[in-house]
Image (cartoon, grey):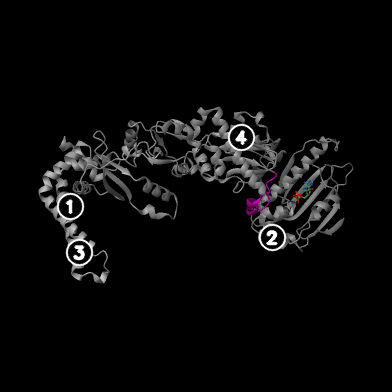
Amino acid sequence: MQKGKIGVTTDNIFPIIKKFLYSDHEIFLRELVSNAVDATQKLKTLSSFGEFKGELGEMNVKVAVDKKEGTLTISDRGIGMTAEEIDKYINQIAFSGAEEFLNKYKNDANAIIGHFGLGFYSSFMVSKKVEIRTRSYKEDAQAVMWTCDGSPEFEMSDIDKKERGTDIVLYIDDENKDFLEESKIESLLKKYCRFLPVPVVFGKEQEWKDGKYVDTDKDKVINDTAPAWTKKPTELTDDDYKNFYAELYPASDEPLFWIHLNVDYPFKLTGILYFPKIKSNFDLNRNKIQLYSNQVFVTDSVEGIVPEFLMLLQGVIDSPDIPLNVSRSYLQSDSNVKKISTYITKKVADRLQEIFNNDRKQFEEKWDDIKLFIEYGMLSDEKFYDKAQKFALLKNTEGKYFTLDEYKTLIESNQTDKDKTLIYIYATDRTAQYNYIEMAQAKGYDVLLMDGQLDIHFIGQLEQKLDKCRFVRVDSDVVENLVKKENKDADALSAEQREIMTTVFKSQIPAIEKADFLVMFEPIGENAQPVIITQNEFMRRMKDMSAMQPGMNFYGELPDSFNLIVNTEHPLSKRILSETESACNADVAPIQAEIKTLQEDIEKLRDSHKNKKDDEIPVTEKEDIRTKESKVDELRKQEENLLATYAGSNSLVRQLIDLALLSNNMLKGEALSKFVKRSVELL
Ligand code: ADP
């Protein structure tokens, strides 16, 4: 029997392990099973090189719970250890600055374990005593037992053990009794060991017999030792990929695409990433990718390793080169990890390009589902943008798909305006904007459908990236103005007529909550509609963007600003003008004349004050201006009242406004029912 002290510089590491590693206790099982798997694989390797000549036999790792004894045992038939090896690998854990480091990372068991190579010692997080019973594969090796009760003292003695390999026996402590529950151990094994390369046995397969489940003789293997990502892509069929996906995410729909990752240099990485089918925003679950290190599950939070935009993908990544047992902040600054992220981005882009090239039809069919990922990638990653701009698609309101280049060619001749700016016309809602889409199409324009969650941002990006271009929503202006081909000259109305018509229309717009209207005039031809409602592109976009950004409430609080555009060339608006003039001119003309005179007077007075300092201007003249101004205001009100009263009696005005509102889906409630009644009367 040998007694000794474990070689740590801090007096007693075990209380520290127990005290500080209160989170993540469960990873001890991962560490011990991984050690057992390593020992097994090492022996297989030795055997294949002829350095071990004995029988390998069954090489499972067995996990067993003994409730009576209060033990959990992990057994393997791997290389085992001699007494010297235990001394070297287990006893001499030397490290310095331990306490400082432990304090810093006390909530990150992974970091601590990784830092010290304390895999085995993590067993003390849950045990009051640990035994190692081991026999080396070497011929005539003497089996040994090492025990330690959680103090730095250990004991080591020779034992009788026939079988090659190692049993790690944990005497579970009172606070951690749940690790003696079979269901708990089984679920942990399924979490961490599901894809380990050596069969892990836990209990027996069961069968239904005489009204209950009973154990059979057959060992229950809890893992799949050769998961799809460890195989070569050429060995796998589409069904293999789909089946593996179903194994990972049992309740999900079939994936849209997958990407098999496989690199050796400058780092080792394998894996399969899937593009999931997203049914709603609710499904947008980041952190579905699982990270493995040599088939040992490490984590499913992959920030920093996988590029942000690809965190919406699913699947597995396996790399022994990612320093897994370190803290997140360290990970993010690791240069290997950065390379991995760049590599994955490139690989995903290349794969999408390949599918696009080989099977455009399939690519188009799935576009609506993958567009979110791709736009997100293009928006957040310059390199990805550069690659993706070759296969990213635009979809028009007819359901046809175009690449950015194809679309440019399509619209170039008809949608370039007088300033040589290419105008992309888009709709965000095919139903609500139906009327506008139809008008644009009648003019020979193509209308894109931009109804995705990220489209508003994507539009902004395209405006920056593409040659001189602008995106305008189909209802942002009258169709004649969407693509301005020439400078329209002089408008058909005099200033007085404008004043009249503005009041006539403005006074009759029904009150709509959170909507403001500006009355404008456009000579857009007698065949175009008489009154059209449009929404300013800039203001609308600002509002849409702010709706997505918390804290940018300023624009969100503003009412929507609409333009009510009166087509001055339409016979009906001409009729309204002439009817109004003949009904009101007798009263209005004198008022307008008076306003004109007053304004000229004010103007003259102002002119004469131009080069004078304030105290040089006679008080009487200042007074005079003020009186005249308030007189103008008063007259204006008078004029407006006159016109508004008249407009209220002219049902044609209301009818035209309501029709425009109706085709914009804005006529509701009382206003709508009034419209219906009025329409019947007019008929
Ligand atoms: P790490 O696995 O990171 O090296 P551990 O503390 O888990 O750190 O293990 C230390 C060493 O002890 C291992 O490198 C290995 O040489 C030896 N060892 C641990 N478990 C076993 C086992 N089941 N069979 C053989 N050797 C083992």
Structural distance between the alpha carbons of marks 3 and 4: 85 Å
Residue 71 position (above or below residue 11): above
- Asked if disc 1 is less than 8 Å from ligand 1, the answer is no
Q: Could you tell me residue 28's position as x and y percent?
A: 70, 50
Q: Could you tell me residue 352's position as x and y percent?
A: 56, 34
Structural distance between the alpha carbons of marks 3 and 1: 22 Å
Which of the two labelled residues, at mark 4 and mark 1, occupies the earlier sequence position? 4
Query: Looking at the image, which is closer to me, 605 or 105?
Result: 605
Which numbered tag is attached to residue 244?
Answer: 4
Residue furthest to the right: 140
Query: Looking at the image, which is closer to me, 56 or 488?
Result: 488
Structural distance between the alpha carbons of marks 4 and 1: 74 Å
Residue furthest to the bottom: 615
Quarter of the picture holding the N terminus: bottom right
The residue beneath circle 1 is 640
Q: Could you tell me residue 33's position as x and y percent?
A: 72, 45
- Kind of residue at disc 1: Glu
